[in-house]
Amino acid sequence: MRVATVTTQLSSQFTAARTQAHTAYVRQAIAPATQPDDVIAQTVSNLLQSLSAVWKLHWETEHKDTLWRLAVNGVQGAGGASICFRKPCPCGSSLTHHQVRLNHSHLHRLHSFWDCPVAQAVREQLQQQLGMTQLSRQAVWLLQPPAEHINTGVWQVVCTAAISAMDVGRRSMWSAYHATGTTATGTAIPAVTQAARTAVQSFWQILIQFADRPVIPAGHAWLGLGTAHPFLATRQQDGDRDQDTSPLVVQLPPALALDVL
Ligand SMILES: [Zn+2]
């Protein structure tokens, strides 16, 4: 077989596997709701457009990386490489016997990036900024603005930062677990609380780093960003700022302002 033919076959196999992974991600994001295959395919297409928009942003790759991996269930230690853990998360949560039998690695993805208290701490930050009591997984995982007044560009950055911060917190929790060997039934509860705090601080620090730029990102998604927008807003009295001052400001919660700066 010619090299070009093999390359084409491998490339199409890779593309098919990636599409399959993105489809599974979308289905898990909207669960327990379901949608027909054509709607799911359109949602995958929309997700890829959002991922592409984020990728084009002038922003450190390390902040985008976790979302890219999450979307193909490739986060190491959170279901990545189809590895299923049978031991409990340090937060104390463990799979049921039924779930262990299923051996579905995406259950770990769901826990680490949604249900774990560390991920929930980041979700609460989003809800507080939005003034919402509930925020859907679909909105966060698929980068879909949860309300009409939320700027699409800002929301894409917020979700990318939130997912990255959840992973920072998750890894810090496991590091503390391996260092002490304790679980949530012992002295590790403060470690889980500390990991949640680390995740929240990381989320805001990522946004602060993002906002430190000379211009607002180009593109339709960023149009119309006002001075009162949650998370990231335009700076007031823009005409008075000097060239070194960013046109973006981060809307830090007052209780956190001193912690993360
Ligand atoms: Zn957990």
Image (tube, rainbow, N blue to C red):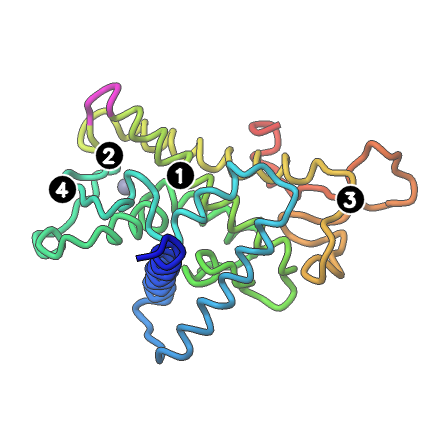
Which residue does the numbered mark 3 point to in the structure image? 215
Mark 4 surroundings: few (<14), some (14-19) or many (≥20) residues within 10 A: few
Query: For the residues carrying marks 4 and 2, which lies nearer the camera in this image?
Result: 4
How would you classify the magenta stretch by its main secondary structure? helix
Which residues make up the magenta segment? 178-182
Residue identified by numbered label 1: 167
- Residue on which disc 2 sits: 90
Residue at figure coordinates x 28%, y 38% from the top left: 77
Against 260, residue 121 (above or below) is below
The answer to whether mark 2 is within 8 Å of ligand 1 is yes
State the separation of the CA atoms marked 1 and 4.
20 Å
Label 3–label 4 contact, CB within 8 A: no
Q: Which residue is disc 4 drawn over?
A: 86
Amino acid type, mark 4 = Arg
Looking at the image, is mark 2 or mark 3 nearer the viewer? 3
Say what amino acid the circle numbered 2 marks: Pro
Q: Mark 3 or mark 4: which comes first in sequence?
A: 4
Indicate whether residue 25 is drawn in magenta: no
Residue 179, magenta (yes or no): yes
Q: Secondary structure at mark 2?
A: loop
The foreground one among 51 and 201 is: 51
Res. 175 image quadrant = top left
Is residue 22 at least partly visible in the picture?
A: no
Q: Residue at 55% across / 59% down in the picture?
A: 50
Query: Is tag 2's residue or tag 1's residue first in the polypeptide sequence?
Result: 2
- Label located before the other in sequence (1 or 3): 1
Question: How far from the left and from the top, in percent, is residue 136?
Answer: 43, 62
